[in-house]
Image (tube, rainbow, N blue to C red):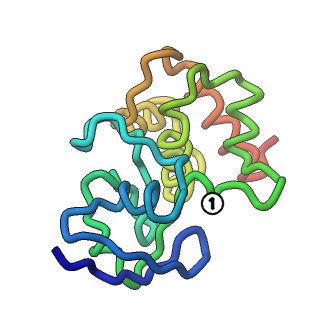
Amino acid sequence: MSKIHVTTTVNGDTVEFLAESRDTLLDALRDQLGLTGTKEGCGTGDCGACSVLLDGVLVCSCLVLAAEVQDKQVETVEGLATGAELHPLQRKFIEHAALQCGFCTPGILVAAKALLAQNPDPTESEVRFWLAGNLCRCTGYDKIIRAVMDAGAEMRGAN
């Protein structure tokens, strides 16, 4: 099987990799680019652990073929922090103890970033609805919701 040469932008950096036609974006991120923050939970787009932004749109990277990201912008959890400075969402997740095992956290952080970009002042119901595609077996969600709302408030200067 021949490999496909893909050039794309991941977290602001131009990258190139070779992918087989059946490789997913998740495979490429983890196996080709060494970006292991994005997790594979279900492999069917049901759990949200592999959530990334593709040209600013929230997608499950397990459902996107690697070849489809040619000339596109991909943002992963690794792109949230700026150097050693954590993104407000990351800081608020720590402050609110909004994680336990951490497996779902990268996908939830990326999904929350997409929400706050689209709606900087969501209600609790809107946050819950938006994050419904991200499953967590440990936290019970309340601390996650509070962390997202607190990060949103900080990002819009309400704190």
Where residue 47 sits, quadrant-wise, is top left
- Seen from the viewer's position, the closer of residues 107 and 119 is 107
Return the residue found at the far left.
Answer: 1
Whole-percent x, y for residue 26 in the image: 37, 55
- Residue at 54% across, 42% down: 106
Q: Is residue 139 placed above or below 31 in the rendered structure?
A: above
Residue at x 33% of width, y 51% of height = 60
Residue in the image at 71% along x and 24% along y:
96
Q: Is residue 144 found left or right of 95 in the rendered image?
A: left
Of residues 121 and 137, the one drawn nearer to the viewer in this rendering = 137
Relative to 99, is 68 above or below?
below
Quarter of image, res 59: bottom left
Tell me the kind of residue under disc 1. Answer: Gly
The foreground one among 157 and 12 is 12
Mark 1 residue element: helix
Q: Quadrant of the C terminus?
A: top right
Residue 151: where, in percent of width, then height?
A: 69, 41
Residue 45 in the figure: left or right of residue 159: left
What is the number of callouts on the image? 1
- In the rendering, at what x and y percent does residue 4 appear? 28, 80
- Residue, disc 1: 79
Above or below, comparing residue 15 to residue 111 in the picture = below
| Side of 155 where 14 appears, left or right | left
Residue 158, quarter of picture:
top right
Considering every residue shown, the one lying at the far front of the view is 1
- Spot occupied by residue 102 in the image (x, y as percentages of width and height): 57, 29
Quadrant of the rendering where the N terminus is positioned: bottom left
Residue at 21% from the left image edge and 42% from the top image edge: 44
Neighbor class of circle 1 (other Cα within 10 Å; few <14, some 14-19, many 20+) is some
